[in-house]
Image (tube, helix red, strand yellow):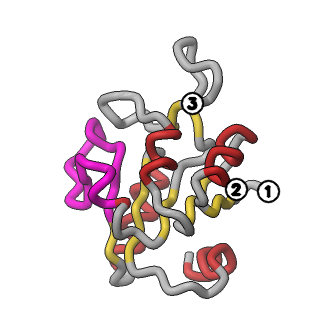
Amino acid sequence: MDNLLGDIVGGMHVAKFVIVGGGHQQVAIAEALFLQGHDVALFGFARYERPLAMQCKHLAHVLADADLILGPTPCAQTTACAPDNAYLNAPYHDIPVCIEDILTQMYEGQVFIAGEVDAATVALAHACGVHIVDITK
Protein backbone atom coordinates (compact mmCIF):
# COMPACT_ATOMS: atom_id res chain seq x y z
CA MET A 1 0.00 0.00 0.00
CA ASP A 2 2.68 2.52 0.97
CA ASN A 3 4.74 1.79 -2.16
CA LEU A 4 1.75 2.26 -4.47
CA LEU A 5 0.72 5.50 -2.81
CA GLY A 6 4.30 6.70 -2.75
CA ASP A 7 4.58 6.11 -6.49
CA ILE A 8 1.31 7.93 -7.15
CA VAL A 9 1.82 11.02 -5.00
CA GLY A 10 5.53 11.37 -5.61
CA GLY A 11 6.63 11.50 -1.99
CA MET A 12 4.16 14.17 -0.84
CA HIS A 13 3.25 13.97 2.84
CA VAL A 14 -0.34 12.79 3.21
CA ALA A 15 -1.89 13.55 6.57
CA LYS A 16 -5.56 13.04 5.72
CA PHE A 17 -7.20 10.70 3.24
CA VAL A 18 -10.80 10.92 2.10
CA ILE A 19 -12.20 7.86 0.38
CA VAL A 20 -15.31 8.49 -1.70
CA GLY A 21 -17.54 5.77 -3.06
CA GLY A 22 -16.66 2.27 -4.06
CA GLY A 23 -17.16 -0.95 -2.19
CA HIS A 24 -15.40 -3.46 0.01
CA GLN A 25 -11.99 -2.63 -1.47
CA GLN A 26 -12.26 1.04 -0.47
CA VAL A 27 -13.31 0.08 3.06
CA ALA A 28 -10.31 -2.26 3.31
CA ILE A 29 -8.00 0.53 2.10
CA ALA A 30 -9.50 2.96 4.63
CA GLU A 31 -9.05 0.51 7.48
CA ALA A 32 -5.46 -0.29 6.46
CA LEU A 33 -4.57 3.40 6.26
CA PHE A 34 -6.20 4.02 9.64
CA LEU A 35 -4.21 1.18 11.22
CA GLN A 36 -1.03 2.78 9.83
CA GLY A 37 -1.90 5.94 11.77
CA HIS A 38 -3.41 8.07 9.01
CA ASP A 39 -6.43 10.33 9.42
CA VAL A 40 -9.11 8.78 7.19
CA ALA A 41 -12.70 9.70 6.34
CA LEU A 42 -15.18 7.73 4.24
CA PHE A 43 -18.01 9.20 2.19
CA GLY A 44 -20.60 7.27 0.24
CA PHE A 45 -21.17 4.30 2.55
CA ALA A 46 -24.47 5.21 4.25
CA ARG A 47 -25.94 1.78 3.44
CA TYR A 48 -22.82 -0.29 4.05
CA GLU A 49 -23.35 -3.72 5.64
CA ARG A 50 -21.87 -2.66 8.98
CA PRO A 51 -21.32 0.65 10.78
CA LEU A 52 -18.13 2.46 9.83
CA ALA A 53 -16.63 4.81 12.40
CA MET A 54 -14.86 6.77 9.65
CA GLN A 55 -18.10 7.47 7.76
CA CYS A 56 -18.94 11.15 7.30
CA LYS A 57 -22.20 12.64 6.09
CA HIS A 58 -21.00 15.98 4.75
CA LEU A 59 -18.50 15.76 1.95
CA ALA A 60 -17.57 19.46 1.93
CA HIS A 61 -16.37 19.30 5.55
CA VAL A 62 -13.92 16.47 4.97
CA LEU A 63 -12.72 17.66 1.57
CA ALA A 64 -11.68 21.01 3.01
CA ASP A 65 -8.68 19.60 4.87
CA ALA A 66 -7.97 16.43 2.88
CA ASP A 67 -4.59 15.88 1.29
CA LEU A 68 -5.65 13.04 -0.96
CA ILE A 69 -9.03 11.86 -2.21
CA LEU A 70 -9.31 8.23 -3.26
CA GLY A 71 -12.17 7.25 -5.53
CA PRO A 72 -13.37 3.89 -6.78
CA THR A 73 -12.54 1.74 -9.80
CA PRO A 74 -14.40 2.27 -12.00
CA CYS A 75 -14.79 5.90 -11.01
CA ALA A 76 -18.26 6.34 -12.47
CA GLN A 77 -21.34 4.21 -12.71
CA THR A 78 -23.44 4.06 -15.82
CA THR A 79 -27.16 3.62 -15.39
CA ALA A 80 -30.23 4.28 -17.47
CA CYS A 81 -30.61 7.54 -15.53
CA ALA A 82 -26.95 8.51 -15.91
CA PRO A 83 -25.62 7.17 -19.23
CA ASP A 84 -22.93 9.86 -19.32
CA ASN A 85 -20.91 8.61 -16.31
CA ALA A 86 -21.84 11.71 -14.32
CA TYR A 87 -22.28 9.84 -11.05
CA LEU A 88 -19.69 8.34 -8.74
CA ASN A 89 -19.59 4.57 -8.41
CA ALA A 90 -21.02 4.55 -4.88
CA PRO A 91 -23.30 1.51 -4.56
CA TYR A 92 -23.51 1.82 -0.76
CA HIS A 93 -24.62 5.44 -0.67
CA ASP A 94 -28.23 6.38 -0.14
CA ILE A 95 -28.39 8.93 -2.97
CA PRO A 96 -26.45 9.38 -6.23
CA VAL A 97 -23.23 11.38 -5.88
CA CYS A 98 -22.44 13.64 -8.81
CA ILE A 99 -18.74 13.55 -9.71
CA GLU A 100 -18.90 17.24 -10.58
CA ASP A 101 -20.02 18.01 -7.01
CA ILE A 102 -16.90 16.32 -5.67
CA LEU A 103 -14.45 17.97 -8.05
CA THR A 104 -15.90 21.48 -7.70
CA GLN A 105 -15.70 21.25 -3.89
CA MET A 106 -12.03 20.30 -4.01
CA TYR A 107 -9.46 23.06 -3.82
CA GLU A 108 -6.87 23.74 -6.46
CA GLY A 109 -3.95 21.36 -6.20
CA GLN A 110 -5.74 18.57 -4.35
CA VAL A 111 -5.18 15.07 -5.70
CA PHE A 112 -8.01 12.76 -6.77
CA ILE A 113 -7.09 9.13 -7.48
CA ALA A 114 -9.51 6.68 -9.06
CA GLY A 115 -9.63 4.08 -11.79
CA GLU A 116 -11.13 3.98 -15.26
CA VAL A 117 -11.67 7.74 -15.24
CA ASP A 118 -13.39 9.00 -18.38
CA ALA A 119 -12.19 11.95 -20.47
CA ALA A 120 -15.01 14.26 -19.31
CA THR A 121 -14.06 13.73 -15.65
CA VAL A 122 -10.39 14.37 -16.43
CA ALA A 123 -11.31 17.60 -18.25
CA LEU A 124 -13.50 18.75 -15.37
CA ALA A 125 -10.76 18.00 -12.84
CA HIS A 126 -8.27 20.03 -14.85
CA ALA A 127 -10.76 22.91 -15.12
CA CYS A 128 -11.12 22.84 -11.32
CA GLY A 129 -7.35 22.80 -10.81
CA VAL A 130 -7.51 19.29 -9.33
CA HIS A 131 -4.68 16.85 -10.07
CA ILE A 132 -6.28 13.61 -11.20
CA VAL A 133 -4.59 10.23 -11.38
CA ASP A 134 -6.13 7.23 -13.14
CA ILE A 135 -4.55 4.18 -11.51
CA THR A 136 -5.58 1.99 -14.43
CA LYS A 137 -3.38 3.83 -16.92
Q: What quarter of the picture does the C terminus occupy?
A: bottom right
Q: For mark 3, give the secondary structure.
A: loop
In the figure, 45 relative to 94: above or below? below
Crowding near pointer 1: few (<14 within 10 Å), some, many (20+)? few
Q: CA distance from mark 1 to mark 3?
A: 20 Å
Percent x, y of residue 40: 34, 68
- Identified at 60% across, 54% down, the residue is 114
Q: Earlier in the sequence, mark 1 or mark 3?
A: 3
Residue pointed to by mark 2: 134
**CB under 8 Å between discs 2 and 1:** yes
Extreme right residue here? 137
- Identified at 25% across, 60% down, the residue is 54
Q: Earlier in the sequence, mark 3 or mark 2?
A: 3
**CB under 8 Å between discs 3 and 2:** no
Residue pointed to by mark 3: 86
**Amino acid marked by disc 3:** Ala
Q: Toward which corner of the image does residue 109 lie, by quadrant? A: bottom right
Q: Main secondary structure of the magenta part?
A: loop
Residue pointed to by mark 1: 137
Instruction: Report the span colored magenta.
Output: 41-62
Q: Is residue 17 magenta?
A: no
Q: For mark 1, give the secondary structure.
A: loop
For the residue pair 26 and 43, the one nearer the viewer reads as 43
Crowding near pointer 3: few (<14 within 10 Å), some, many (20+)? many
**Amino acid marked by disc 2:** Asp
Percent x, y of residue 102: 46, 46
